[in-house]
Amino acid sequence: MFSIVVHGGAGPKRDQESGDAARASCLAAAERGAAILSAGGSALDAVEAAARWLEDDPLFNAGLGAVLNADGEVELDASVMNGETLEAGAVAVVKTVKNPISLARLVMEKSPHVLLVGEGADAFARAQGVPAIAPGSLVTPLQRQRWLERTGATHGTIGAVAVDQRGQVAAATSTGGTAGKLKGRVGDSPLIGAGTVADSRWAAASSTGLGEFIIRVGLARAVLEGVRRGAALNLACEEAIAELKRIGGDGGLIAVTPSGGVGWAFCSERMAGAFVKSTGERGTFFD
Ligand code: ASP
């Protein structure tokens, strides 16, 4: 038994064409993770592989194609959590790394810390042998144009949650944050409990939407707490989103349980995503 769910961000509706492309890419990412899980690989490896796929796709606001901050720069946030050990790693305000999700994993595995930010995170990447990308190389013409026109209301953060054949769960989240954000702003995505959570006793979850609200309700952990209290996964997801909505937030989340259950909920106009289960069930969701 295994399951994986990925999301490509909650937010305003995309047009039909880019919505279809986002869904297809989410399914491809989920299939990539599922191939690892089906070969007996770990949930952690699966969510990292799925997240890297989506970071590399310029359709999403993570890695290549991330939104620009107020100064016209890319500043990336990401986090990962291993539900087997409750170890976690995260980076924020990173500028020189192509795949911040893998840097977050290095923080988890090769440092005594959970969260590194800014220059320190970029320096840690170099110390770990992660090549520096040229400044500006993650900036796509579309995001540059949106920045020039100040029309960047896009979401498109990415995330993945999985349970492996051993019943262990993991979660990963990666983003460029919100368009036009102040330099140095950190959202929910690199914060354990807000953007990402995994505990193999209960669930794993990844959030998307306006981080300023998600942080305040601890959105990912709210799902885990719902499951811990005995709620069915989809109810736990809905209740967490209801709380986000109650304080005026906008967003969504995906989740899995150690027994292979998959769930998602959102209160924004749409949330792109996909899932694959060992039973052969697979599909996409858009809105
Ligand atoms: N949660 C992300 C942030 O606030 C943005 C998003 O999910 O669209 O940084």
Image (cartoon, grey):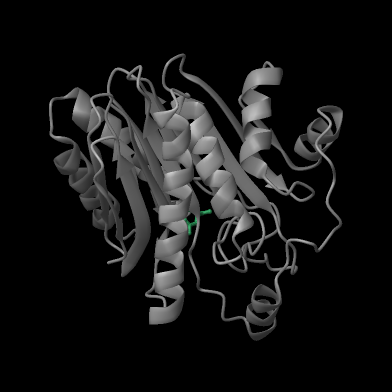
Residue at image x 16%, y 24%? 229
Among the 4 quarters of the image, the one containing residue 267: bottom left
Q: Can residue 275 be seen at all in this image of the molecule? A: yes
Looking at the image, residue 20 sits to the left or right of residue 109; the answer is left
Q: Position of residue 247 (x, y in %)?
A: 29, 55
Q: Position of residue 63 (x, y in %)?
A: 65, 54
State the quadrant of the C terminus: bottom left
Q: Nearer the viewer, residue 250 or 262?
A: 262
Q: Nearer the viewer, residue 237 or 34?
A: 34
Residue 198 in the image: above or below residue 117: above
Q: Nearer the viewer, residue 202 or 147?
A: 202
Q: Residue furthest bottom?
A: 149
Q: Can residue 192 be seen at all in this image of the molecule? A: no
Q: Position of residue 93 (x, y in %)?
A: 69, 47
Q: Position of residue 133 (x, y in %)?
A: 83, 51
Residue at image x 57%, y 81%? 151
Among the 4 quarters of the image, the one containing residue 248: bottom left
How many badges with numbers are in the image? 0
Residue at image x 66%, y 61%? 182
